[in-house]
C-alpha cells in the first residue's frame, strides 16, 4: 500500500468551510517514457480519486498522465455533521486504496 | 518482397502520422464536446499557474470559480502535452467553494485551459500561456 499524507482538521464548527489536502506516493508512470533500449514504459497511474463525507460525495477527480508523480490534491468541503471522511484512490491496474479520517463537528 | 523505398516511405509516414503532442484543435474538440450547446464565456474561472515554469515535472496549479452558483465540474486541458486532458473535477453535494489545487506536468511551453460547468448550465473558461524552461521528461 502506498504511503498517504492527509491533512484534515480534527474539530470544526458546523457550517465551516474546511480544506482537505491529500497526497499519495505513486510514480504516475505516464506511458510516454521509454527505456534506454527504446521500449515504452507501460502507463500506470492513479486514474480516479473520490472523497465522501458520511457517504455523501465531496469531490471526485479523473486524473490523467499529465498529473505529476505523487499526486497532490487540495479541495474544500462544508462541515455538516460529525463522522467519517473517506478517500479512495483507484490505480490503472484496478487496485484501490481507501483511507478514513474522523472529524468532529460542533 | 517489399521494395526498400516503400518501407522507408511507410516508416516516415508512420512517424508523421503519430504526433507527439496534443493540438489546439484536439483541445477545442474536447471542450466543444463538454460544453455542447451552451455558450462558453471567458471569466468567473481563475487559473493560477506560474507564468514561468522552471520544472515541468511538477507545476503547482490552482483553479477556482467565483460566485455563489454551484459548480458541477471543472476541467483542465493542456494544448501541447502528449495528451490533452489534465484532470476533471466533479463536485458533490458536500463540496465547499469550487477551488482545487494539484500539481501537473508540462511537456513544453504552451497554453493551459480551464473550463467550468455550473449547475445553471452556463460554461466559463480561463486560459494561461506559459513558458516552461525544463520540460517534463518524456525520454
Image (cartoon, coloured by chain):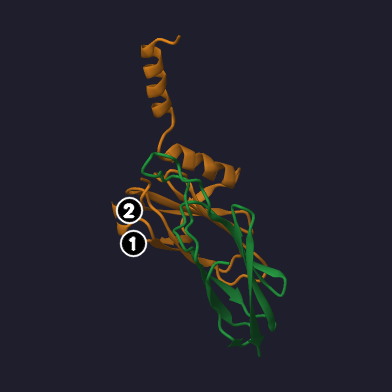
Mark positioned earlier in the residue sequence (1 or 2): 1
The residue under the point 59% across, 52% down is A92
Chain at numbered mark 1: B
Q: Residue furthest front?
A: A37
Q: On the picture, is A7 further left or further right than B55?
A: right
Nearest to the observer: residue A7 or residue B30: A7
The residue under the point 43% across, 26% down is B14
Quadrant for the N terminus of chain A, please. bottom right
Work out whether A3 lies above or below B114: below
Residue holding disc 1: B50
Query: Could you tell me which secondary element the residue under label 1 belongs to?
Result: loop
**Camera sees residue B73:** no
Hue used for the chain lettered B: orange
Work out whether B134 lies above or below A13: above
Query: Could you tell me which secondary element the residue under label 2 belongs to?
Result: strand
Nearest to the observer: residue A79 or residue B45: A79
Classify mark 2: residues with Cα within 10 Å, few (<14), some (14-19) or many (20+): some
Q: CA distance from mark 1 to mark 2?
A: 7 Å
The residue under the point 44% across, 32% down is B18
Residue holding disc 2: B130
Residue A68 falls in image quadrant: bottom left
* Tags 1 and 2 on a common chain: yes
Percent of width and height locating residue B82: 43, 43
Q: Give the chain coloured green.
A: A
Quadrant for the C terminus of chain A, please. bottom right
Percent of width and height locating residue A15: 63, 82
Amino acid at each position: 500500500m502506498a504511503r498517504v499524507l492527509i491533512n484534515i482538521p480534527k474539530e470544526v464548527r458546523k457550517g465551516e468551510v474546511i480544506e482537505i489536502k491529500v497526497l499519495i506516493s505513486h510514480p504516475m508512470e505516464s506511458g510516454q517514457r521509454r527505456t534506454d533500449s527504446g521500449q515504452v514504459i507501460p502507463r500506470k497511474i492513479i486514474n480516479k480519486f473520490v472523497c465522501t463525507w458520511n457517504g455523501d460525495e465531496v469531490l471526485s477527480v479523473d486524473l490523467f498522465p499529465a498529473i505529476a508523480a505523487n499526486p497532490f490534491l487540495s479541495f474544500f468541503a462544508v462541515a455538516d455533521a460529525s463522522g467519517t471522511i473517506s478517500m479512495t484512490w483507484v490505480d490503472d491496474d484496478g487496485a484501490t486504496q481507501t483511507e478514513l479520517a474522523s472529524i468532529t463537528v460542533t | 518482397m517489399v521494395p526498400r523505398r516503400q518501407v522507408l516511405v511507410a516508416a516516415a509516414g508512420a512517424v508523421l502520422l503519430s504526433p507527439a503532442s496534443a493540438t489546439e484543435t484536439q483541445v477545442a474538440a474536447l471542450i466543444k464536446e463538454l460544453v455542447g450547446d451552451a455558450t462558453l464565456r471567458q471569466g468567473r474561472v481563475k487559473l493560477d499557474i506560474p507564468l514561468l515554469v522552471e520544472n515541468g515535472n511538477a507545476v503547482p496549479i490552482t483553479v477556482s470559480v467565483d460566485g455563489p452558483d454551484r459548480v458541477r465540474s471543472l476541467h483542465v486541458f493542456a494544448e501541447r502535452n502528449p495528451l490533452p486532458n489534465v484532470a476533471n473535477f466533479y463536485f458533490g453535494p458536500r463540496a465547499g467553494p469550487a477551488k482545487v489545487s494539484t500539481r501537473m506536468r508540462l511537456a513544453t511551453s504552451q497554453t493551459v485551459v480551464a473550463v467550468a460547468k455550473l449547475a445553471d448550465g452556463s460554461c466559463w473558461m480561463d486560459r494561461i500561456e506559459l513558458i516552461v524552461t525544463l520540460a517534463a521528461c518524456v525520454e
